[in-house]
Image (tube, rainbow, N blue to C red):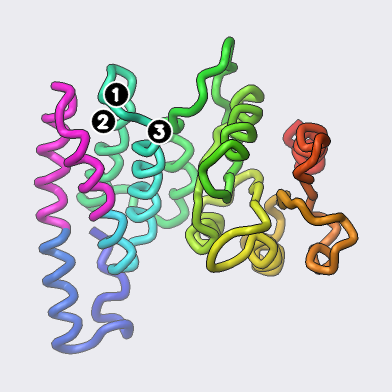
Amino acid sequence: MDMRGVGTGAYAGATADMVAGLLAEFVGESQERCADLTRQIPKGDGLPELRRFVFDVAGQARNFGLSMLETVADQAQNYLTAITALDDRAIDDLGQYLDAIQDLLNGKQADEGDIRQMVRGLPVRRGIEIDEAPEVRDIEVVLVMAPGTQQTFVERELRACGYRATAIPDTLKALAYATRAKPDMMIVSAVMPQLSGIDLALALTAIPTTRNIPLAVITSLDAGDPQLKVLPPSVALIRKTSAFGDDLTKALQQGFLL
């Protein structure tokens, strides 16, 4: 496991020793739990334990500053929200997630620059099944919005285009994810708790590593509303009106995804 930050200024002396000990304990326990689940899920068992495991790994990885492990665990959590049972496809997909987590716990693929490639190699989240869904392309669109009808509609449209849709219902997590994984586009709901979607869009367009990611904001506000006037012209608007579908298409075209 990558020990960067431990004993290099972020921590020092006895504190560094304590953190290193806690990290080693976390890695060892997580390796054992991951191995147990890898043996368990092919039998169709262990879904509750798997949910707890990826939740624990994501939280602890965040505490230790292990951003790559945190991102993969978050993706596994995202996948798990869309399933209720371990069918053959879920067993195979979740096996791949566990393999990726175990690799990171074992110290493999720890280069931060690999995160975009690793994330796109993970299984796609289960969503609304559509007839004749095209093969998933290497194009990722992040949806930053609360689960519900709006997310379902947008995700269905993206899947119909063969895009990989990643749903993140937290703007702060979405900001961190964008800086790491560099998605091809982000579609953000204007009304979000904590950091609003408009504030998120402003932050993304101001940060050098994310300012070139195409953005769209879903809103019920009029285009001339003062809250929207602060957005750069490059941010597309998707109105919550009868033109929603047309606006979504235009936003994808503006982002050069269509």
Left or right of 248, for residue 188: left
Q: Judge whether residue 209 is colored magenta.
A: no
Q: Earlier in the sequence, mark 2 or mark 3?
A: 3
Determine which quarter of the picture holds residue 244. top right
Task: From the top left corner, tell me how far across and down residue 145 is, in percent.
Answer: 57, 49
Residue with the most extreme top position: 132
Residue drawn at x 14%, y 70% as measured from the top left: 22
What label does residue 95 carry, if any?
2
Vertical order, 251 against 163 (above or below): below
Relative placement, left or right, of 252 versus 86 is right
Q: Of helix, strand and loop, which one carries label 2?
A: helix
Q: Are marks 1 and 2 in contact (CB under 8 Å)?
A: yes
Determine the CA span between mark 1 and mark 2. 5 Å
Q: Which quadrant of the structure image shows residue 138?
A: top right
The single residue placed furthest to the right in the displayed view is: 224
Give the answer, above or below, for where 79 lies relative to 6.
Answer: above
The residue at 51%/43% (across/down) is 147
- Cβ–Cβ below 8 Å for labels 3 and 1? no
The region drawn magenta spans 27-56
Secondary structure at badge 1 equals helix
Q: Tell me the number on the disc at residue 196.
A: none
The mark tally for this picture is 3
Q: Earlier in the sequence, mark 3 or mark 1?
A: 3
Amino acid type shown at disc 3 = Ala
The amino acid at mark 1 is Asp
